[in-house]
Amino acid sequence: MATKYYAMIDGEQKGPFSLEELPAVGVRPSTYIWCKGMPDWQKAEDNADVCRLFRNHLYDIMHPGDQPVFNSREELDKYKIKPEEPKDPHRSRFDAFLQQSGNEPLPTLDEIESQKDKSSPPVNMIGFAWLVTLLCFFPTGIVALVFAYKCKKAWNKGDNELAHDYSRRAKMWTGVTFFIGVIGYGIFLSFSM
């Protein structure tokens, strides 16, 4: 007889479930489980059989060509495997796993940028850009300064979205300039000693 597992899901004891049913009912590595023969409840990640099941489940998701071929819809339903949806080039394999396990996929960078509040002025990077230009690395510092001034100009014209985009680029180039300067100073100090 197969081992039956009980799980604490959303604060309630649910079960019994077979080992293969655990991912489908919402058991995650941090979910507490219990089966006959266990002295007490423990996290699923601490149980060797469940841990092996999750590893195999992840392997199957990441290597879809290795999954068995099902000849009918009944066979597919028997193993509770959902048909593959069209792949989105902006979603990672981890997002696909979250989607298959019933969790929300992570937002893309474009979705995050579109949700930002563009009504407030962006961070003024002109002072920082001047500082890293003078102290760190002049060529990339000039690029940071150009984007910082373009940001200010776009904001004054009322183009909020463009101003935030220029601010993001000014931050990036300020950071690049700072790190190039730190690396350059490190190399200079190592040769001067």
Image: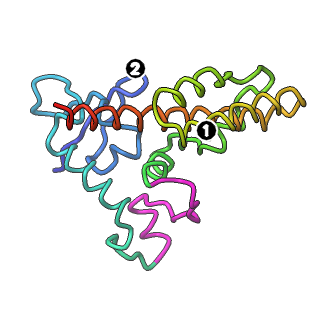
Q: Amino acid at mark 1?
A: Ile
The spot of residue 62 in percent (x, y) is 36, 60
Look at the magenta stretch and give its main secondary structure: loop
The spot of residue 94 in percent (x, y) is 43, 49
* 48 relative position to 91: left or right: left
| Residue 91 part of the magenta-drawn span | yes
18 in relation to 68, above or below: above
* 4 relative position to 169: left or right: left
For the residue pair 143 and 68, the one nearer the viewer reads as 143
| Residue 120 part of the magenta-drawn span | no
For the residue pair 65 and 176, the one nearer the viewer reads as 176
For the view shown, which residue lies furthest in the right direction? 157
Per the image, label 2 sits on a secondary structure element best described as loop
Q: Which residue is mark 1?
A: 142
Q: Write down the region rendered in magenta.
A: 72-92
For the residue pair 98 and 166, the one nearer the viewer reads as 166
- Name the residue located 45 percent from the left edge and 31 percent from the top edge: 136
Q: Which residue is mark 2?
A: 11
Disc count in the image? Answer: 2
Badge 2: residue crowd in 10 Å (few <14, some 14–19, many ≥20): few
133 in relation to 72, above or below: above
For the residue pair 108 and 68, the one nearer the viewer reads as 108
